Image (cartoon, rainbow, N blue to C red):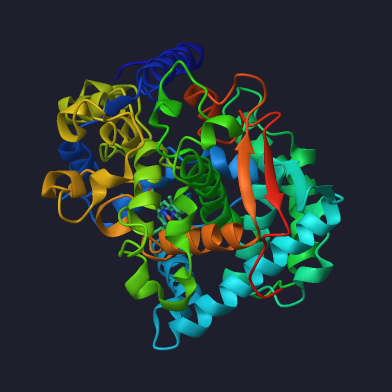
């Protein structure tokens, strides 16, 4: 019998363990692969070889920074099919009143609410200046859009009943929404979001919502609903007011100063009366104005400025079946079967591969949209001229079984908010100096880059029931 001194045995085991650990290093991510053709994007977002749990895991993995950043626990960061079913059906319930037989009443209520919120905000923020017969009110642009859309989502979609438009504390909402904005930016830095900031925002939201039962973790719903909507409203307003000064999108910039607005037609008129019959009016151009329809304006805005520029998935290798804890004695090492098993244990774990659907690039592809692909032209989406290939290239709401449940609701909601803005007397959006360049609006996917921007209202023109 072979005698091995205990010390030598321990040493050999230690060496063996180091070798196994060295080879079986932790799964790590390599450089992400970027996919920008609509075909490749559709294949990524609708994989045929994954079951439901694997699809959710492949989405949750690249989104895990959102757990640290916001403390969210919803389906975007969870591999659980139970979490997915519950979250999706809760989101669908929120939208149901807008697509049921009483949808007319729901949109009427949404419009009235939006109008009241805007008036409350403008009353609270700026004294009226009488200029001739006009009563001009000017407020900073992005805080205004952030606050009114946030309040609309809370009251009009999430039905937070303890809030009332006339008693909303806009300073508090401004604080919360600007923090969420900053948290996005910080979430992409190595240091991440400071814990105190995350806790503070969550505490404030819990106080605001006061609805533990329906929304135990408010950010789970605030992020997918408001965070996407406010940037779409901001971009739609800017583009509607500057059309047809399409060169506002050229790198040379400008086009956003009120002087230039006189040159163009104000597209806001296309949204008039929308809430009265959204199912007919959204896709139909106004007879007196002609094309484009509200739908074409909103979708063209989202084509150029998709709120989720990239949608990521992880290719997570299935780990080899191992039994890493089985004890292997020194003599048995010379057994070939055990040796093979040992080699399997020690096999390096393949890397996780992150693939990103580059929606932004796909939706601006000249091969699909022609040489003016990067310019705002809502006429291109006229039902008479838009091609099937172009329709299929609009991927701002994702694709496949995890496509956005609000893909029909959200564009109409943006349209009704535009209608309310027009009725509140919005006149212009002004960038500081010679600003207003496309690159500026796009900083951090439209979250930042609005510094110094203002929006002006003529409140003597304002209509709507207040
Ligand atoms: C402009 C507004 C919005 C945009 C651009 C947008 C965009 C998206 C995108 C791109 C996805 C797919 C994500 C992925 O595949 O990983 C998605 C999924 C989802 N969205 Fe939206 N969204 C918007 C508004 C909303 C609203 C208002 C709600 C709630 C009522 C909502 C609820 C959801 C849900 C529940 C999913 C997950 C669906 C699933 O996993 O089965 N979204 N959204």
227 vs 360: above or below: below
The residue positioned 48% from the left and 47% from the top of the image is 266
Q: Where is residue 121 in the image (x, y as percent from the top left)?
A: 77, 57
Ligand 1 appears in which quadrant?
Answer: bottom left
Q: Is residue 383 left or right of residue 123?
A: left
Residue nearest the viewer, comparing 396 with 332: 396
Q: In this view, does 153 lie to the left or right of 44?
A: right
152 vs 47: above or below: below
The residue positioned 27% from the left and 46% from the top of the image is 379
Q: Quadrant of the C terminus?
A: bottom right
258 vs 241: above or below: above
Could you tell me if residue 135 is visible in this image?
yes
Q: Position of residue 11 (x, y in %)?
A: 47, 12
Q: In this view, does 398 lie to the left or right of 97?
A: left
- Answer with the quarter of the image where residue 327 lies: top left
The residue positioned 39% from the left and 78% from the top of the image is 99
Could you tell me if residue 71 is visible in this image?
no
Residue nearest the viewer, comparing 109 with 227: 109
The residue positioned 25% from the left and 23% from the top of the image is 343
Q: In which quarter of the image is the N terminus?
A: top left
Furthest-front residue in view?
A: 132
Q: Where is residue 61 in the image (x, y as percent from the top left)?
A: 42, 41
């Amino acid at each position: 019998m072979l005698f091995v001194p205990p010390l030598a045995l321990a040493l050999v085991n230690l060496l063996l363990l180091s070798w196994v650990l060295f080879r079986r290093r932790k799964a790590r991510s390599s450089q992400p692969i970027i996919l920008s053709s609509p075909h490749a994007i559709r294949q990524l977002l609708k994989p045929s070889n994954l079951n439901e749990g694997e699809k959710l895991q492949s989405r949750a993995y690249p989104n895990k920074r959102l757990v640290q950043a916001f403390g969210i626990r919803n389906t975007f960061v969870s591999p659980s099919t139970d979490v997915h079913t519950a979250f999706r059906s809760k989101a669908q319930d929120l939208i149901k009143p807008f697509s049921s037989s009483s949808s007319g009443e729901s949109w009427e209520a949404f419009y009235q609410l939006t109008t009241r919120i805007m008036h409350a905000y403008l009353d609270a923020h700026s004294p009226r200046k009488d200029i001739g017969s006009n009563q001009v009110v000017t407020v900073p642009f992005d805080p205004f859009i952030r606050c009114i859309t946030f309040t609309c989502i809370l009251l009009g979609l999430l039905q937070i009943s303890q809030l009332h438009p006339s008693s909303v504390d806009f300073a508090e909402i401004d604080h919360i929404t600007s923090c969420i904005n900053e948290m996005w930016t910080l979430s992409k830095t190595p240091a991440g979001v400071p814990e105190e900031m995350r806790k503070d925002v969550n505490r404030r939201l819990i106080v605001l919502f006061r609805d533990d039962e329906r929304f135990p973790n408010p950010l789970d719903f605030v992020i997918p609903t408001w965070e996407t909507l406010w940037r779409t409203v901001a971009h739609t307003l800017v583009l509607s007011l500057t059309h047809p000064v399409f060169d506002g999108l050229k790198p040379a910039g400008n086009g956003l100063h009120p002087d230039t607005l006189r040159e163009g037609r104000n597209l806001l008129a296309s949204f008039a009366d929308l809430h009265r019959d959204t199912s007919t009016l959204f896709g139909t151009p106004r007879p007196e104005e002609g094309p484009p329809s509200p739908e074409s304006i909103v979708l063209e805005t989202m084509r150029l400025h998709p709120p989720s520029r990239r949608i990521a998935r992880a290719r997570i290798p299935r780990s080899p079946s191992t039994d890493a804890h089985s004890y292997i004695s020194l003599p048995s090492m010379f057994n070939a079967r055990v040796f093979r098993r040992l080699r399997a244990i020690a096999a390096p774990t393949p890397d996780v591969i992150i693939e990103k659907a580059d929606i932004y690039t796909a939706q601006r592809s000249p091969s699909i949209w022609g040489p003016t692909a990067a310019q705002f032209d809502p006429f291109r989406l006229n039902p008479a001229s838009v091609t099937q290939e172009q329709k299929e290239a609009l991927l701002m709401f994702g694709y496949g079984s995890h496509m956005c449940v609000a893909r029909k609701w959200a564009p109409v909601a943006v349209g009704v908010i535009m209608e309310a803005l027009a009725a509140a007397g919005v006149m212009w959006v002004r960038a500081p100096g010679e600003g207003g360049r496309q690159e500026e609006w796009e900083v951090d996917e439209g979250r930042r880059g609005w510094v110094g921007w203002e929006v002006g209202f003529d409140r003597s023109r304002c209509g709507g029931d207040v």
